[in-house]
Amino acid sequence: MQGKRGHERFLVEGLEIKGKMMFAARVKILNISLSGVAIETDKRLDIGSEYSLTIEDRDGVLSVKGVVVWSRVNGHERGLGGHMIPIYIAGMKFRDPINEGIEKIIRLAEDHMKGEDTEDGGRHPV
């Protein structure tokens, strides 16, 4: 999954990792690396703009800031009243990369991918 990136990205699907942004009702973390994150949201993020992202997992909350390096419409969903709402995906580069919280999330994603034992004594499916 590395491609042109400097750090390997890890999928977080199936993990108890949630994202929040102040202005968005929906924020889903798609993948993460030591240097950035890809998210899905119900609000358009402007390329070149900086945003705060809160990442929550079972052990706590981590707040990071990132600059949007790419963004595009990824589909539509029906909202309240039947109106169609665009869904966007965007890639953000962390402003202050490589911190302990991000490293912990990466280790959790690596363990999940390998199906290794977790801190709670269980095994995540591969």
Image (spheres, helix red, strand yellow):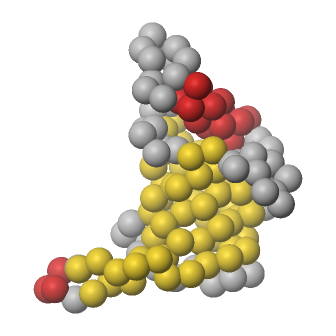
| Residue 50 visible in this rendered orientation of the protein | no
Q: Residue placed farthest to the left in the image? A: 81
Q: In which quarter of the image is residue 121?
A: top left
User: What residue appears at the point 48 percent right and 66 percent down from the top-left corner?
Assistant: 40
> In the rendered view, would you say 87 is above or below 105?
below
Q: Where is residue 23 in the image (x, y as percent from the top left)?
A: 46, 74
Q: Position of residue 79 (x, y in %)?
A: 23, 79
User: What residue appears at the point 69 percent right and 61 percent down from the top-left corner?
Assistant: 65
Relative to 46, is 57 on the left or the right? left
Q: In which quarter of the image is residue 53?
A: bottom right
User: What residue appears at the point 37 percent right and 69 percent down from the top-left corner?
Assistant: 25
> In the rendered view, would you say 50 is above or below 113?
below
Instruction: Pick whichever, 35 or 22, lies toward us.
Output: 35
Q: Residue placed farthest to the bottom in the image? A: 83
Relative to 9, is 58 on the left or the right? left
User: What residue appears at the point 74 percent right and 81 percent down from the top-left corner?
Assistant: 48
> In the rendered view, would you say 91 is above or below 47?
above
Q: Position of residue 39 (x, y in %)?
A: 54, 63
